[in-house]
Image: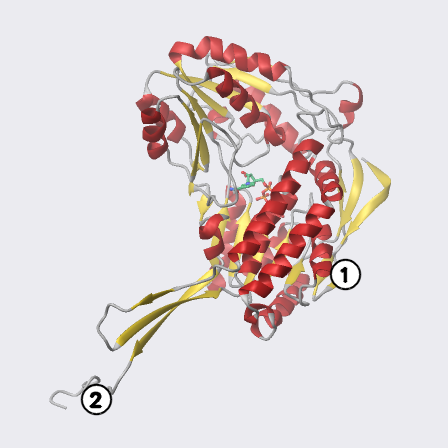
Amino acid sequence: MTTAMSARSVQHFIAGAFEDSAESAPIDRSAPATDEVVSVVQAGGPVEVSRAVAAARAAFDDGPWPRMTGMERSVLIGRVADLIERDAATLAALDAEEVGKPIRLAEGDIAGAVGLWRYAASLALTMSGSTYTNNGPDFTGLVLREPIGVVGLIVPWNFPALILSQKLPFALAAGCTAIVKPSELTSSSAQHIMRLTEEAGFPRGVIGMVVGDGRAGQAIAEADGIDLVSFTGSTATGRRVLAASAGNLKKLSLELGGNAANVVFADADLEDAAAGVVFGVNFNNGECCVSQPRLLVEDAVADDFVAEVARQTALLRVGQPMDPRTDVGALIHAGHREKVTSYIDGASGDGAAVIFGGTRLTEGELGRGQFVAPTVIDRVAAGSAAFQDEIFGPVLTVTRFHDQDEAVRLANGVQYGLANSVWSKSVDTVLQVAKRLQSGTVYANTTIDAPPQMPFGGYKASGVGREMGQAGFEEFTELKSVNIRTGKRAGTFAIRAGA
Ligand code: NAD
């Protein structure tokens, strides 16, 4: 590991000011493609979190933000969208460098982030409840929708700016104040977005950020002054967040791990499906919660289809994240690369065979980084670790099926339930399978393809709650029933017998 001359400093943003940690030593972050230290991140913990909570609490309880009109909030959120668009190249470069993802994908993430801020700005205008007038002439029931309060937003490393944008503008649109906690591995774009919110003119304390590792996240999950935590990360950490949040019974939204299947029927457009399968597992280096590492393919077309998938996999170019020709970049860190290759090593045997890739790439300039060849493993058994676990790398397992029942059983036969794809030209097959799949998202004849209006979240061990869409916005709200009687109450409260 070497330290670049120009390593960035990433600080907390508390009560409108950027600052260092009072006590803990900062964390060095090396770019996964070069092993050079590119950022030095302050390590926050309970001290910084409690100060950020105090600022966000004051901004919510006494400040202007929750009391502004939806239109006023919408204008400020929309202004951030414009500023992110203005600084798109800078933000994309930060994420590409720290994640190790190809720059073209990072640019797509930032365009997606702009869309999310714009969409959330429009939702600020829609905040509404409902009215019941069908309980007699003297009763009116008002269901008021209110911001839930102070929210903690914990973000993983794989889509730093994008996942932050799946949370923060929606919370703001609802009138909440927020504390962001990016991953210690990829905090720089979050710091840049904090600066943009300052430039946009958000009132002091409405948005704060504590950077650092799990200690900062744990302090957010435990904080009594926080009303909701929206967490995206692994299922194991999600369980810790759930336990830590018990103190004040805060509301939780948990977006957790996935292990999606691409279910390909013999009657699919096999050309599109093969391209979709190769995209679905290699997009973002395979480090994507909705990655599709499991190909389930119907027997009748399996041999030819798998050969085509292997052929297209061989065309992928592994390379430096900043090179626009790169299709697959570096994995997030050495430990993760070890984990990914251990699944490849463990998958052989029991009839399974690596038919493409399967190695760490060490030639030339790739030798300094965490590069793994896109890999295809054929004839993987449903009980194997490679099939069951979230590998989170560019590794495709192939399993064959005979009929729809077996396809659905295989697709649903893992603990996760975040997303799956079904490929068939038959509308019957598509709808029947979509209804039987246990996942919060089903892509039909497409993959990893979701506009911000579509709610997103998991079944089973993939999580609780929804992000994006109207449902994602409403996660950041609380309902209050106001039960109103009109007219004289005489005789209504006759608790004493005969009164
Ligand atoms: P992670 O669980 O290790 O970390 C996620 C975040 O939680 C980081 O900011 C981390 O610092 C913080 N954290 C760590 N320990 C904590 C604790 N005890 N309490 C509170 N916060 C803590 O996940 P990761 O490795 O950053 O991300 C990869 C995982 O995220 C994968 O499992 C992936 O599937 C999942 N993911 C899910 C979605 C989704 O929308 N469902 C999206 C992206 C990633």
Q: From the image, state whether disc 1 or disc 2 is nearer to you.
A: 2
Which residue, as the protein is rendered here, is positioned at the far bottom?
499
Left or right of residue 174: residue 44: right
Q: Amino acid at mark 2?
A: Ala
- Residue at 42% x, 32% y is 414
x and y percentages locating residue 91 in the rendered image: 72, 44
**Residue 164 location (% of width, % of height):** 61, 49
The C terminus lies in quadrant: bottom left
Q: Is residue 478 left or right of residue 118?
A: left
Give the label on residue 19, or none. Answer: 1
Q: Secondary structure at mark 2?
A: loop
Q: Nearer the viewer, residue 161 or 429?
A: 429
Report whether residue 155 is seen.
Answer: no
Instruction: Categorize mark 1 by other alpha carbons within 10 Å: few (<14), some (14-19), many (20+).
Output: some
In the picture of the structure, the residue carrying the numbered disc 2 is: 490
| Residue 143 x %, y % | 37, 67
From the viewer's perspective, tell me whether residue 212 is left or right of residue 493.
right
Q: Quadrant of the N terminus?
A: top right
| Quarter location, residue 480 | bottom left
The amino acid type found where label 1 is placed reads Glu
Above/below status of 404 relative to 488? above
Residue at 77% from the left image edge and 59% from the top image edge: 20
Q: Quadrant of ligand 1?
A: top right
